[in-house]
Amino acid sequence: MTLRLISCNCFDVSLINRRRAKKIRLLAKELAYLAPDLLCLQELISHRHRRYMESLLTSQGYRTVYTPNRMRTTAGGLFFASRLPIVAHYFVPYAQQGIKMSMQLGDRLLTKGCQIVRVRAHHATFTIVHTHMADVYNEHSTRQRAIHHKQLTELGAIISTLTPPLLLVGDLEERTGTSPYFRRLIKTTGLVDVTNHLPDRIQSTNTNVAYINAHSPIREEPGKYDYILASPSLQAAAAAELIFTEPSRVGRHDEHLTDHYPLDLTLNL
């Protein structure tokens, strides 16, 4: 059985980009056209955009998972959709959240955490751990880095309680993949990075510049933001690539539909 999983950061921040609604709708249609078996979306924040995405995908036969929070947003900005039967699902908020008086306040208000979703493929089941970590907006801030590192440690502890096989999917905000906390996550969980072969991870479209100034060029920024880590038993069956690497026409402008190039995983079970 061959499964397809897509992981995508939507950057659903309408206050920064007035065309965000158009981009979300176009992105939703593109994802529905690709019809992956499993879909992991990060930063699908507003209920209005989440409802549109959910309506379109459920009309295509998907089951969806998300957790509303008190800010009328999607908890953690996380949204999951599956064509496969969902056996169980729950959301685990991280104990360590972003710093209030900093750029991490937005992360804190979203309540960063991870979705745990158990899906069934024929007679086998496996777990998807879907997450988006708090970003380090100021690389010189030891406090912001500490929040990120503590969340990585929490994530490792959560995964260690789960029964393999599993996939860890999402935006880990781990630029190089070489920090001691990330290496500890790998060692603790025994997971393998099945996206490590992708080209030196020119994965961010650096669209923040274009959001503020529509006439700014889209620039690529090297860095490894999004990951798919797999249990060793799934490693040989997994093959990943980047998609949506070219801009799309949004109104009168050419823009990337996502904050990072999405990951497209094929899994042969």
Image: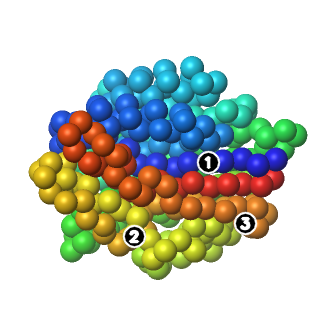
Q: Which mark is residue 5?
A: 1
Amino acid carrying label 2: it is: Ile
Horizontal placement of 69 versus 3: left or right? left
Circle nearer the viewer, 3 or 2: 2
Determine which residue is flagged by label 3: 235
Secondary structure beneath dot 1 equals strand
Q: Which mark is residue 158?
A: none
| Image quadrant assignment for residue 151 | bottom left
Q: Residue 125, how many percent across, how many down?
A: 79, 43
Whether residue 43 is visible to the viewer of this picture, yes or no, is yes
Horizontal placement of 210 versus 59: left or right? left
Query: Vertically, is 159 above or below 220?
Result: above
> Marks 1 and 2, Cα distance to the nearest angstrom?
20 Å
Residue furthest to the right in view is: 123
Residue under the image location 45 percent in, 28 percent down:
53
Determine which residue is flagged by label 2: 202
> Marks 3 and 2, Cα distance to the nearest angstrom?
23 Å
| Image quadrant assignment for residue 266 | bottom right
Circle nearer the viewer, 3 or 1: 1
